[in-house]
Amino acid sequence: MWSTFTALLALVLSQKTLSHVFSLLHISLPQALTLLFFLSLSLLLIIRNRNHTRIYLLDYTCYKPPSTQKCPLENVEFLVRRSRVFSPESVSFMRSIVLKSGIGSESYGAPFLFAENPTPNFNLALAESLDSVLTTTLQLLSKTRTQPSSLGSIVVSCGMFAPTPSLASFLVSKLGLTESIKTYNLSGMGCSSGAIALDLGSSLVRTHRSPVLVVVTENVSHNWYVGSDRSMLVTNCIFRVGCSAALLTSQKAGAKFELVRTMRTHHGSDDSAYKAAFQREDEKGLVGVSLTKDLVRVAGLALRDHIRALAPHVLPISQMVLYVCRTIHARVRREAKVLVPDFMHAFEHVCIHTGGKAVIDQVGKVLCLDPHVLEPAHAVLHRFGNTSGSLVFYEMAYLEAKGRIKKGDRVWVLAFGTGFKRGEKIAMADLRGFAN
């Protein structure tokens, strides 16, 4: 059989047969080859487009804790003093950090702070995570009218708290999902976990072609530091309770955003970047996360490297040409100033992870962003504090609530975390209007 097929194929492809076919079609050999080239190119493009699955963010929700967990500075100071585990010097230091942090009086503290005995333990930490993760997930499923049984995968990211069974398994149990569900639990990703979880979720949608639930949270109770090392006390001052959930799909109908590009960079090979935010024991054996004074500088340097890799993929050609000309001109004149392209020609909105006021200002300085571009980051930091990886979703919600996102707008979601990692998602709001 194969020998017969091979003989027929040789006959068809023989020069004499081809010449006979061309004469019947009244075309020359060069014309036929040109036609064959374009047919092959069209076939390759069709195959490529069929293999490229578009990823859509159907919708998302952000967790809003009970109003009883709000933390005005006076309440926080009272609760901290009541615990009697911090020296007067440590209390004074934390007060000064909160005053400089840019966090307002409406952010939400961990539930254990309001207990009669404000001492964090595993059970309180577990209750904090389970409540936020389940509440946010149920709100999203109700909002999108999605049946839990339609989910193909679940991705849960919680940087500093990894109980067993995992938080993803907890959702499987509470939602009553079948044994075919695929679960992924991320930890240790720091404040970049939101963008990284979306990246993993996008890959799962492309692979399995089924909806993916992405939940991003952090745990304040489990990481409350009770020592006196000032580099570790900072985390007590800036981190607040928060959680977000998003539903990714390959179906365009009803989606809010299309996720059009992902880029991640890692600077862990550099010691100063690797140890900029580091979990360790202090001199008394108490565990905490140390935020070094080098953190802001490391964030700036990592961002410069990141945008250098990003620019060719997103900037218009005119901006790239202008940037190259300016760079050549600066080098000819031996100017030491670092030039940065204008990324606002590529995006209408930027959601910057609001790690703190100093971090936001540093990002704005590196990217040469106007104050109105940074305003959502400052506003969300003031309202919710640093909720870690979920915070970029709070910024997106802020922009949407203010009616700033219009159909066709491009949103740059930029986050960075321990390691030192930087991740981003570029979303395009070209699918559903935001007038309401």
Image (tube, rainbow, N blue to C red):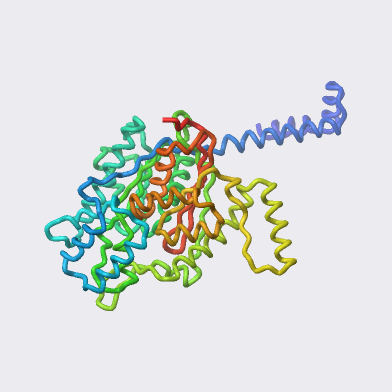
Is 212 situated left or right of 130 in this image? Answer: right
Asked if residue 91 is positioned above or below residue 116 in the image, the reply reads: below
- Where residue 251 appears, as percent x and y from the top left, is 47, 32
- Where residue 367 appears, as percent x and y from the top left, is 55, 56
- The answer to whether residue 56 shows anywhere in this view is no
Viewer-closest of 311 and 4:
311
Identify the image quadrant of residue 247. top left
- Where residue 159 appears, as percent x and y from the top left, is 35, 57
Locate the N terminus and report the quarter of the image it occupies.
Answer: top right
Viewer-closest of 274 and 109:
109
- Where residue 151 appears, as percent x and y from the top left, is 36, 37
Locate the C terminus and report the quarter of the image it occupies.
Answer: top left
Query: Outermost residue toward the bottom?
Result: 283
Asked if residue 347 is positioned above or below residue 277 in the image, the reply reads: above
Viewer-closest of 156 and 138:
138
- The answer to whether residue 144 shows anywhere in this view is yes
